[in-house]
Image: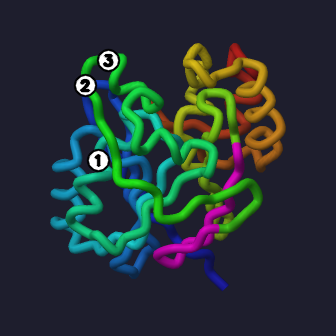
Amino acid sequence: MSLPKLRIEPILSQPFAENTYVAQLEGRSDCVIVDPGLEPDLILEYIARQRLQPAAILCTHGHADHIGGNDAMKRCWPDCPLVIGAGDAPKLTDATLNLSAPFGMPITSPPADVLVHDGETYSAAGLDLLVLETPGHSCGHVVFVWKAGSPWVVFGGDVLFHRGIGRFDFPDGSFEQLATSIRTKLFTLPDDTLVLPGHGQSTTVGEEKKLNPYVG
């Protein structure tokens, strides 16, 4: 039996060079949108061009650069569930908590439709995604892990980067929590697991275990 193939389109949003991902299983027209960024028109254009139907909007955490496109997505697809870890849900509707107000550009999002927790599986567009709570960059950060294909794929938000890690100097950040999240949740995945971060290029668990200067 052949393994399913996952098509993933990264869409870069400025001004923070944030990665949004649109993911779909080969042969299907439904998709999930991960972390809609501050240039939602780029996401909408891609989805229209590919004739896709979003089945869920997934947020790894509630910082403004990762939720800035939520309102535009919900206006286009009001019945599409907005999903986020329970700990970061308050950031969606509070511009101070999501760090946009301190930057002088207050942004809010519609509230969550679905709150997820550690160890749960969230399913949409034919994808069964394991939820792992990974605090440290933000208190309620989660990652979504797709394990049905080869390699496994982590939609990782701002936890683990190529040779780097997420910032931990925000009000609810912690280096100790972040390092623990990476070592106990991500570094226990297979070495060939693909990590798709919220900023920068993709990497693998094995590469970062060997070469990451912060947690390797």
Is the residue under label 3 in contact with that under label 2 (CB below 8 Å)?
yes
Numbered range of the magenta stretch = 122-133
Q: Residues within 10 Å of mark 2 (few under 14, many from 20)?
A: few
Q: Which label's residue is closer to the chain start, 1 or 3? A: 1
**Tag 1 secondary structure:** loop
Q: Which mark is residue 69?
A: 1
Q: Residue furthest bottom?
A: 1
Q: Amino acid at mark 1?
A: Gly
Mark 1 or mark 3, which is nearer to you? 3
Can residue 129 be seen here? The reply is yes
Q: Which mark is residue 103?
A: 3
Q: Quadrant of residue 180?
A: top right
Q: Amino acid at mark 2?
A: Met
143 is higher (above) or lower (below) than 198: below
**Tag 2 secondary structure:** loop
Q: Quadrant of residue 131?
A: bottom right
Q: Which label's residue is closer to the chain start, 1 or 2? A: 1
**Tag 3 secondary structure:** helix
Residue at (45%, 34%) from the top-left corner? 63
Q: Amino acid at mark 3?
A: Phe
Which is nearer the eye, 201 or 101? Answer: 101
